[in-house]
Amino acid sequence: MPLNLEDVICRFKLLAAATVYDVLDKMGYPNQALSAEIQPLARGFRLAGPAFTVCGTSTAAYDGTRGSAMSYAMFRSIQSGEVIVFDTGGHKIGGPWGANTGANAKARGAAGIVLDGGTRDARDLIDLCFPTYCRFLTPVLAHGRFQVEGFNVPISVSGQVQERVRVNPGDFVLGDDDGVVIIPQPLLEEVLKYSEAATVAEAQIREALEAGEDREEVDRRIDRWALLKGRRS
């Protein structure tokens, strides 16, 4: 039976990005963590949902004309529950995101955004309670200096283990205070199952350690990867 997306989102929200990354790593997919430079604007922000991918690039010369058909079409295409993942093509001058774009995306039902680039209006985005992860903050307007080139296409964003992480539309995005992990859509059900089992085991380990048990004995007695070891690759 296909997984229900709302149920999947709710279940992933209970999991730590670190645990999910460990599962992916154990499964042979170590290159699924985004760069540690991509951080939440506020502690406590969480992301969980399918990726809505966007790519863009710096303009060759400043162009102050208002908006672009591609950008407007991009916002109209966002579906409820999606997490925007934005490859800015290395743009380092302006912030392609801000309070107005955040308000627009939230009204469309977006669950948050991951920017491999910068944003403006940090306080407004925090007050909007729109989970925003980015590389840097800037007061500089990106309009006229940056343009959206496409959306719902395969992209790559800065990675932590390797230089780039591929993100396809519909891949699952999980973010918390530790950073962001990308779960390839074909692996979603397996990763969810193993991550939930590992979370239960980790809680048991922590309880035993807090009770003063010897760490080596605890690690020998409680195997957080027991279920995963039975997986067929």
Image (cartoon, helix red, strand yellow):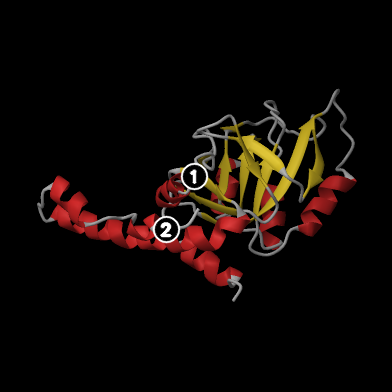
The answer to which of marks 2 and 1 sits earlier in the sequence is 1
Q: Secondary structure at mark 2?
A: helix
Looking at this view, is 176 or 3 the one in front?
Answer: 3
> Which three-letter amino acid code belongs to the residue tagged 2?
Ser
For residue 158, which quarter of the picture? Answer: top right
The x and y percentages for residue 82 are 65, 59
| Along the line of sight, the residue nearer the viewer: 223 or 140 | 223
Q: Which mark is residue 195?
A: 2
Q: Is residue 97 visible?
A: no
| Mark 2 Cα shell of 10 Å, populated few (<14), some (14-19), many (≥20) | many
Q: Which residue is mark 1?
A: 28
Residue 139, position as x, y percentages in the image: 65, 31
Amino acid type at circle 1 is Gly
* Mark 1, secondary structure of its residue: loop
Q: CA distance from mark 2 to mark 1?
A: 14 Å
Residue 178, position as x, y percentages in the image: 43, 43
**Residue farthest toward the front in the current orientation of the protein:** 232
At x 42%, y 58%, the residue is: 195
Q: To which quarter of the image does residue 143 belong?
A: top right
Q: Is residue 64 visible?
A: yes
